[in-house]
Amino acid sequence: MAKFREVPETHQLLNPSDLSSTPTPSTSSNSLDALSAPRSRSRLLKVLGMWFGISAAIGNAIAAGIVRAPGDIALWLPNIYLFFGVWVIGGLYALAGASSLAELGASIPRSGGQYNFARRAFGEYAGFIVGWSDWLSTCGTAAAVAIVIGEYSGELIPPLAGHIKLIAVVIILGFFIMQSRGIKWGSGAQMFTAAIKTFAFVILVAACFLWGGHARAASTPIAATAGLPSGWPLVIAMVLGLQAVFYSIDGWDGIIYFGEEVRNPGRDIPRAIFGSVATIMGIYLLINAAVLYVLPMSEIAGNTFVLGTAAEKIFGPYGDTIIRSIMVVSLLSCLNANQLFCSRTLYAMSCDRLFFRSFTRVNAGGTPTLSLLLSSIVGVLFVLGSFEIVIAMLSFFFVADYTLSYASLFALRKKEPQMERPYRAWGYPWTTGIALLASALFLVASIAPDLKAALTTGKLWPPSPAMLALVILLLSYPVFRVMKWITDAG
């Protein structure tokens, strides 16, 4: 059984001038974190626990994806075994990676997410790639969530219809004001909204199983879905289905964004990660099972609001209103979590001189104020502009970050064998290797259609979102060098 030990807070006593020091592999993990995490006059507060970590994961992961993903997956894979199969594969992928991220999060208890792992294992440029892709995609996610809240609000309250972007901007700014008061406000809102949405989904699932049989029997037969593809089209359909699942379940590792704010990271980070994976996958599998109990596969396929359709079968004309109300609360929880995440990532990069030093400023409530402000501004810009391409690239960015994180565990086990590890990944190296291999195969499969088309037709334009994401990652080096030159000169 793994032993949990609380990591001392030695890093809080160092001077910002220590930032330039280069630790040796034999240095303890606490000293390494200290050298790379200087503080301004105030600092992040160690006030969070396991339940906050689980609520952050639930808030971030269970959101708009569960509304659209079942309809898309049923359209691509109109077979009950393959439909559930991609969800199960997604859950197993998360479970295989959970122990690896639990070890990394407990051993490197810094706020900022997976950026810290890649930087520690492979250097500043690898950290920069993960940090910037994570920060931008999280800001984009916040914008997308705010847009959907605006759409649902207009459906629920007619006078608000037609003001989607205005509602989205107001909500982003509202969470900025609340979170700027301190982490206790943000964490309190997160735990409250996550509890409400979990209870609401449990009630919905129970209602589907209690009354769904009669609703399905009363359904009017409709045309059957298209046949299951075979060969290469089936491979593409499986990849698309997995992309939808990965996007929907991503966020189960939410606690790692708050490593240095957790009271006992060696114990609570692993518990929060495993609890998050179990809770999220349990809810998603139950929701899909409940939907299939109420609706035939042919009625699910291509349905962009499948939960609403199922709820109408159960609750009649009030079903759509009930689901949209649940989703508004769910999306508010998701938006709150994403703004907390992206502010911590930018803060951590600033501490390491990969962004401007002024963004390390933390107020008395434990909020990195300038990092939160810039993250909120970028979210607003995505709302006002065009963020669809960014959203389409999210699953590629997410899996690319996971790939580097799993590789980081292998690298750090070899590079720093004496690192203090309050929790050690179970099944290592097999579970970590499986997660790493699955991530790499997914990335290759994501760009394979573009490569096949290029070889067949000689055309590389327009690129798919996955290929565009890859190009952006490859072109990040000049941006990294410019940012280093600016921050080092300052």
Image (cartoon, helix red, strand yellow):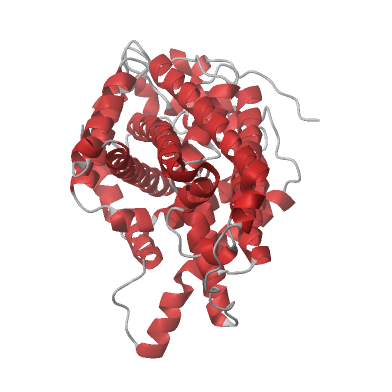
Q: Which quadrant of the figure has residue 318?
A: top left
- Residue 233, x across and y down, in percent: 53, 79
Question: Which quadrant is home to the N terminus?
Answer: top right
Is any atom of residue 108 visible in this view?
no
Question: Which quadrant is home to the C terminus?
Answer: top left
Number of dots carrying numbers: 0
With respect to residue 490, does 6 lie above or below?
above
Q: Residue at x 40, y 18 (%)?
A: 183
With respect to residue 437, does 24 lie above or below?
above
Residue 18 located left or right of residue 461: right
- Residue 209, x across and y down, in percent: 66, 44
Q: Residue at x 38, y 32 (%)?
A: 332
Residue 158 located left or right of residue 71: left
**Nearer-the-camera pick, 163 or 316:** 316
With respect to residue 2, does 391 lie above or below?
below
- Residue 196, x across and y down, in percent: 51, 27
Is any atom of residue 313 visible in this view?
yes
Q: Give the residue at the far right of this rendering.
A: 1
**Nearer-the-camera pick, 229 or 359:** 229
With respect to residue 255, does 42 lie above or below?
above
Q: Residue at x 40, y 53 (%)?
A: 394
Q: Which quadrant of the figure has residue 54?
A: top right
Q: Residue at x 61, y 29 (%)?
A: 272
- Residue 244, x across and y down, in percent: 49, 57
